[in-house]
Image (cartoon, rainbow, N blue to C red):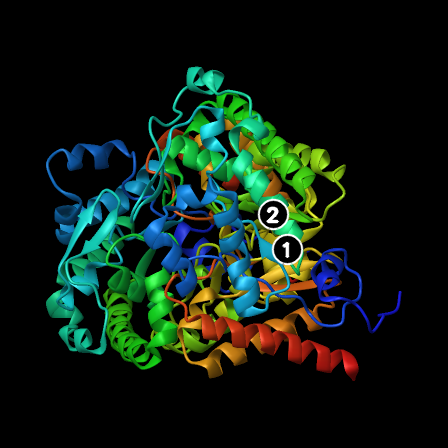
């Protein structure tokens, strides 16, 4: 396959996800829509996070803010990992300084049995409408997303964001069958949620397993991988690329990649070259440490070049440049904009050589 | 194939493994083996706090040596928190169930002068006396393992002020205020050099450097911001083998091992053999049974320990351990069985000189 010079911007991200040649390395940032942007903070003065996700026009506006300001190659639907949970009967509140709070949380098998099936058109209709609005106007592909079952389970069981998912991990060991029932249900939720997003128009999906780094490969293989395999099997018929991302996963990458995902999302705690050694031949997304953006531009530049070098060194078949985790709220958007330009310039020049 | 040496003492076994010399069987100990659910420790805890035990040489020695008696391990890791020397530097803290909480975290350059230099003999005599007592009590049955926090982990405790998930504040300070970072690590390194030297002089056979959280960094940042300091700590005790440990170190293994350590401690988030291959076979390694395994039934423990030993294949230079601290609720009887199993399985036939 040769690179057509007229490869459109819209293709760059989706082509890289498939490992196809591109005119320049595509770039987007996890949590690119959010508190780092002044235009987002202005909206938040009059609307809460939940209100934004329940208003299609506002959600579309927020989703597209970083596309115009930063020049990124993809938009990601503005929603929260916990957005589908009210739809299965879990009361959700956003608490300032804490994040999503689920009260009462799921603690017993009886609680699991009481969870409702997920019906997207009832549970998240405004988000699906937002997807349709965004698709009509967005110049770049739209990424849908969902929390992976273990990560969803950590919110559902802990009741809020927790440092080490201790309660969930204890449940996993003490009552593996009950834990399995919970993960099976959350897998069904995630499949239904992502299928509805794809039907509404998203062109790629990312699975966020943000809390998976709290367990080791042995537990992953026994308790989580079977659900992840089923998840990716069910998603494979949807015809859109899947990105499988987690944090703290340097030791889990092989097992995660084996479970599925067209693209492996990598956090900053490992070099892409080493990640590619563990998982050869797979497109990779990542992995600049978000804190680097809080330092001087010279360091951003040096570290970004290093990430690009790692991808080149590893001969990663498709590289989607991203941070290793979400944009920090105190990040100066100007740094992000310069970073997008840098990645594009560096990689288009090198392809011209 | 070199014939197995005659039966060694626990101390000899562990020290020979550090140097990759042939051993009669695989040496084994567990991080956080002293304390946990050992009956003698639980009995002491009814009368004393954790800090009272750590700061009373007789009690500390009893708990430290008691683990060797209860579990038959080859190493006696000192019952001491890595935060103890920070207290000696003037840091006010409270040990909570969640971990240490610092009263006034380090956040700017003006906070650094508050950290005063230590005189180990005067400020931490209980640690050094405990080492002396353990040495006498064990008489070679197990190697005495001294310990300290690694530079990143100590700095992270001081900056975060409380246990944190991904050390975000620490990593932010490192990038946004590199001069503050360097000044802080300089002080911590000078302190740690003195602390481990004093432990070695008191009779520690081995020093383990717990840089437990260093895996929060990527390889480039570890090499730039931490490795130069870690190297000084690891070189502070020439002649005494060092074990350099971090959890979740798979992503930084090369620069981490590059900083030093006679032995590299491998956590359970990676394959021991894969890590060993990356380090080179001329380096001793320690690890790496998943601590969650010791909470499972014995049949599972046996199967997983067997698989790990089979992978190692009797290579010289392996110290059996968990990939991180033993769970506090681990059954001491099961741990003892695991030690016996490792000693039995590790016995024969060993392949040396690879």
Alpha-carbon span between mark 2 and mark 1: 7 Å
Looking at the rendered structure, the secondary structure element under dot 1 is helix
Q: Residue at x 39, y 74 (%)?
A: B175
Across the whole image, how many numbered discs are drawn on residues?
Answer: 2
Q: x%, y% of residue A316?
A: 72, 64
Residue B49 location, quadrant: top left
Q: Can you see residue B268?
A: no
Q: Is residue A345 above or below residue A21?
A: below
Looking at the rendered structure, the secondary structure element under dot 2 is helix
Q: Is residue A260 above or below residue B106?
A: above
Chain bearing tag 2 is A
Q: Quadrant of the C terminus of chain A?
A: bottom right
In front of the other: A59 or B67: A59
Q: Can you see residue A46?
A: yes
Chain bearing tag 1 is A
Image marks 2 and 1: residues in contact by CB distance under 8 Å: yes
Q: Is residue A302 above or below residue B288?
A: below
Q: x%, y% of residue B53?
A: 16, 46
Q: Are marks 2 and 1 on the same chain?
A: yes
Residue B241 badge: none
Q: Residue at x 59, y 71 (%)?
A: A307
Q: x%, y% of residue B236?
A: 34, 76
Q: Quadrant of the N terminus of chain A?
A: bottom right
Question: Which residue is the extreme one toward the right?
Answer: A1
In front of the other: A15 or A300: A15
The residue to which callout 2 is attached is A133
Residue B281 location, quadrant: bottom right
The residue to which callout 1 is attached is A137
In front of the other: A192 or B350: A192
Q: Is residue A91 above or below residue A27?
A: above
Q: x%, y% of residue B323?
A: 47, 48
Crowding at dot 1, Cα within 10 Å, few <14 / some 14-19 / many 20+, comes out as few
């Amino acid at each position: 396959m040769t690179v057509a010079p007229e490869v459109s911007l819209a293709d760059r991200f989706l082509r890289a996800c498939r490992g196809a040649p591109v005119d320049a390395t595509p770039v987007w940032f996890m949590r690119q829509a959010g508190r780092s942007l002044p235009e987002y903070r202005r909206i938040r003065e009059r609307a809460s996070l939940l209100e934004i996700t329940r208003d299609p026009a506002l959600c579309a506006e927020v989703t597209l803010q970083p596309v115009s300001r930063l020049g990124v190659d993809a938009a990601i639907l503005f929603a929260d990992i916990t957005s589908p949970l009210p739809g299965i009967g879990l009361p959700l509140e956003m608490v300032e300084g804490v994040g999503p709070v689920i009260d009462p949380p799921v603690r017993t098998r009886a609680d699991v049995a009481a969870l409702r099936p997920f019906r997207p058109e009832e549970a998240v209709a405004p988000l699906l409408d937002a997807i349709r609005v965004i698709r009509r106007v967005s110049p770049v592909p739209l990424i849908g997303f969902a929390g992976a079952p273990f990560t969803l389970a950590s919110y559902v069981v802990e009741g809020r964001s927790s440092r080490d998912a201790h309660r969930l991990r204890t449940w996993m060991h003490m009552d593996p069958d009950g834990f399995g029932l919970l993960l099976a249900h959350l897998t069904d939720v995630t499949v239904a949620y992502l299928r509805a997003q794809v039907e509404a128009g998203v062109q790629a999906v990312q699975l966020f397993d943000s809390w998976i780094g709290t367990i080791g490969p042995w537990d992953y293989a026994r308790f989580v991988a079977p659900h992840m395999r089923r998840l990716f099997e069910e998603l494979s018929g949807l015809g859109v690329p899947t990105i499988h991302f987690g944090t703290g996963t340097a030791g889990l990458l092989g097992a995660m990649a084996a479970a599925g995902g067209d693209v492996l999302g990598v956090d900053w705690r490992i070099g892409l070259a080493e990640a590619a050694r563990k998982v050869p031949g797979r497109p990779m997304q990542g992995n600049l440490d978000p804190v680097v953006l809080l330092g001087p531009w010279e360091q951003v530049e040096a570290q970004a070049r290093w990430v690009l070098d790692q991808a080149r060194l590893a001969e990663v078949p498709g590289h989607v440049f991203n941070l290793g985790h979400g944009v920090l709220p105190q990040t100066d958007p100007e740094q992000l904009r310069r970073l997008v330009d840098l990645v594009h310039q560096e990689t288009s020049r090198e392809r011209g050589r | 194939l070199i014939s197995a040496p005659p039966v060694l003492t626990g101390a000899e076994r562990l020290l020979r493994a550090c140097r990759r010399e042939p051993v009669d069987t695989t040496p084994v100990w567990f991080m956080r083996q002293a304390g946990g659910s050992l009956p003698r420790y639980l009995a002491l805890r009814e009368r004393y706090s954790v800090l009272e035990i750590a700061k009373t040489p007789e009690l500390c020695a009893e708990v430290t040596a008691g683990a060797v008696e209860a579990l038959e391990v080859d190493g006696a890791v000192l019952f001491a928190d890595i935060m103890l020397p920070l207290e000696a530097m003037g840091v006010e803290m409270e040990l909570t169930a969640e971990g240490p909480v610092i009263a006034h975290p380090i956040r700017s350059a003006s906070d650094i002068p508050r950290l005063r230099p230590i005189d180990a003999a005067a400020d931490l005599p209980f640690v050094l006396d405990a080492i002396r007592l353990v040495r006498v009590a064990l008489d070679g049955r197990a190697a005495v393992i001294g310990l300290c926090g690694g530079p990143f982990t100590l700095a992270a405790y001081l900056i975060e002020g409380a246990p944190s998930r991904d050390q975000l504040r620490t990593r932010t300070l490192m990038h946004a205020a590199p001069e503050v970072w360097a000044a802080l690590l300089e002080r911590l390194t000078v302190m740690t050099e003195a602390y481990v030297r004093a432990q070695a002089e008191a009779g520690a056979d081995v020093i383990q450097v717990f840089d437990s959280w260093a895996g929060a960094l990527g390889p480039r940042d570890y090499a730039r911001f931490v490795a130069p300091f870690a190297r000084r700590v690891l070189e502070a005790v020439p002649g005494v083998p060092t074990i350099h440990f971090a959890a979740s170190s798979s992503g930084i293994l090369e620069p981490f091992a590059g900083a030093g350590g006679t032995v590299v401690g491998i956590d359970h988030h990676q394959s021991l053999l894969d890590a060993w291959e990356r380090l080179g076979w001329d380096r001793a390694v320690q690890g790496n049974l998943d601590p969650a395994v010791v909470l499972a039934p014995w049949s599972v423990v046996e199967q997983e320990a067997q698989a790990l030993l089979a992978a190692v294949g009797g290579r010289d230079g392996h110290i059996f351990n968990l990939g991180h601290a033993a769970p506090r609720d681990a059954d001491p009887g099961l741990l003892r069985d695991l030690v016996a199993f490792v000693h039995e399985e590790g016995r024969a036939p060993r392949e040396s000189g690879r």
